Amino acid sequence: MKGVQMKSTNYSRIADRYDRNQYRVEEVKVDADLREYMVHQSQSEYAVLDLSCGTGLYLEKQMGGFTDFPVTWHGLDASEKMLEKAKERVKTASLIQGFAENMPYDSESFHFISNNYAFHHYDHKEQVLNEIERVLKKGGIYKLHNIAIHDMPKWWVYQYFPAAYYEDQKRYWTKEVLYQELSLRGLTVKLTVNYRMEQIRVADYLSFAENRDISVLTLLSDQDYQQGIERMCYEVAAAPEKTIVTDFAELFCIAEKNQ
């Protein structure tokens, strides 16, 4: 929702528990889009940036999966605490503390920029896209991966914490706005949304809510958060096998900088 004041997640407060979420750890795979780029765009050396790299989960997986290519790996993140975790995990990557709105890199530095589950955090999204276009080489790829909140209003988080949906509407652009803004900067854009609806056991998700590492839960008032936790606990205690129907949508955006 453009032009609306949004709250910001303080990652220094959740850095120590961020990787306790096994879904977050296990979902990171070797990047098929990065491999496709490298296979079809032969370079003497590839420069890859993980923008808002967090604790280095993506970099760790890629560095292990692309040993057959000459790559310099880079990570940028605003949180020094998150970078401390990343530096423990990926010791040979170049990791820098800085902001996506003002990247400390020369123009046309990177062949591939990965941006996972982070774009909604940026206060000045238009400026971030300007910077991405600036530091991306001609013919380079910007890959954005995020949830598509406008396509998943029945997500279990929103069912138990209704205020979270209100906060996320302020943080996330619609897919139409994202497509338009990237296109305006001369990038060729391909955008897809993968959607699923499924039945889940509430007890299986209680620990994720209690860990409070999902960024939007950190933005809620303690009252709104506790009401949701208490409701989940009550329902699990009353019916340990209780299930609900939830939905989930992932957005994948590949944007190529024109030659």
Image: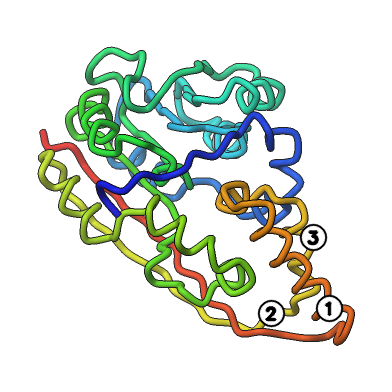
Mark carried by residue 236 = 1
Tell me: 252 left or right of 160: left
Tell me: 123 left or right of 29: left
Please name which of the two marks, 1 or 2, marks the residue nearer to the observer: 1
Mark carried by residue 46 = none
| Vertical comparison of 118 with 76: above or below | below
Q: Distance between the residues labelled 1 and 2?
A: 12 Å
Q: Position of residue 27 (x, y in %)?
A: 61, 54
Q: Is mark 1 on a helix, strand or loop?
A: helix
Kind of residue at disc 2:
Ile
Mark 2 vs 3, N-terminal side: 2
Q: Which colour scheme is used?
A: rainbow
Kind of residue at disc 1:
Val
Q: Distance between the residues labelled 3 and 1?
A: 12 Å
Query: Label 1 near label 3: C-beta < 8 Å?
Result: no
Q: What element carries label 3?
A: helix
Mark 1 vs 2, N-terminal side: 2
